[in-house]
Amino acid sequence: MIPFELAEPASLAEAIALLDPDDASVRPIAGGTALMLMMKAGVFRPARLISLRAIRELSSITTQDDGALRIGAMTPLSVLERSAVVRAHAPVVTATLRTLSNVRVRNVATMGGHLAHADPHMDLPPVLIALGAHIVVTGPAGERTLPVADLFAGYFETVLKRDELITAVVVPAQGTGRAAYLKCTTRAVHDWPALGVAVSLDRDGGTVRAARIVISAATEKPVRLPGAEAAVRGGSLDDAVLRRAGEAAAAEVETISDGQGSAAYKRQLVRVYVRRALAAALAGATH
């Protein structure tokens, strides 16, 4: 690696002031699990890294007055995994974290870094989108919020400006809704999933009142599938409805080819795993 400057601000305001909107070689660093690999490979050569580790205000898990869960961006994934508050609020998040990479990575990686890296193979983005979560972004002009679904612009791309930081993730109260996340992988710790599917269901008795179905890993960024959602809305999720949802998902999704499989293979995975994820959510299985 080439030499670089390391800044360690103690406050959020100081960190934002150190960012340079005109210089792509100035970057914030949270856990660094992905960024350091990019630097070692020579893919990224920073002039300055701004460490966020000393900013205590970004490492917290709290419940808001409206029942929403607020997670500071610098909260390590292992802390989320062990949090009783997170487990009670959104058990699907806890279950997802238990198969996310390995414990060494989870001890270092953070919620904000996980999202800002924008790798479409990441596990939490589709889950958070299915739960209706949004992020809090802070920059020189102050705070703004946007749905997690609107954060990703493409493969390793977000809509964040160079002088903005993700400061929190807010997950709304889930009420009686049910959610599940399934992924297709070899389960080797170094492997990325070929497909991730997150679903959430809001039911009225035996009828699905609303649904969110989100695909990742097989696509350039996490995407919702409105056609598949419409296929289950107003239904009872019997075998015929589940099959119809799987077919609708496979028909509308634009899959990509990569080291985890061809686009055609992933489309077939979508057809199968959307059915399975819906059935898992219906049965109350979070993962």
Image (cartoon, rainbow, N blue to C red):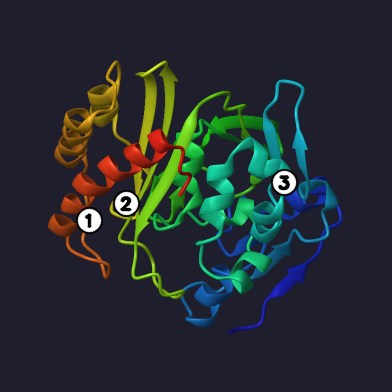
Q: Up-down: is 120 above or below 71?
A: below
Could you tell me how many numbered marks the image carries?
3
Instruction: Left or right? Give the position of 248 relative to 260.
Output: left
Q: What percent of the width, then of the height, locates residue 103?
A: 61, 70
**Quarter of image, res 76:** bottom right
Q: Residue at x 73, y 48 (%)?
A: 16
- CB within 8 Å, label 2 to label 1: yes
Q: What is the C-alpha distance between the residues marked 2 and 3?
A: 33 Å
Asked if residue 116 can be seen in this view, the reply is no
Report the amino acid beneath label 3. Answer: Ala
**Quarter of image, res 198:** top left
Q: Residues within 10 Å of mark 2 (few under 14, many from 20)?
A: many
Q: Nearer the viewer, residue 124 or 20?
A: 124
Residue under label 1, please give it: 256
Q: Nearer the viewer, residue 176 or 191?
A: 176
Is label 2 in a helix, a strand or a loop? loop
Mark whose residue sits in front, 2 or 3: 3
- The disc, 2 or 1, on the residue closer to the chain's N-terminal end is 2
Q: What percent of the width, then of the height, locates residue 216?
A: 36, 49
Q: What percent of the width, then of the height, locates residue 133?
A: 55, 34
Is label 3 in a helix, a strand or a loop? helix
Instruction: Left or right? Give the position of 169 relative to 205.
Output: right
Residue under label 3, please give it: 84
Report the residue that reaches farthest toward the bottom: 1
Residue under label 2, please give it: 220
**Quarter of image, res 236:** top left
Mark whose residue sits in front, 3 or 1: 3
Q: Nearer the viewer, residue 192 or 112?
A: 192
Report the amino acid beneath label 1. Answer: Ile
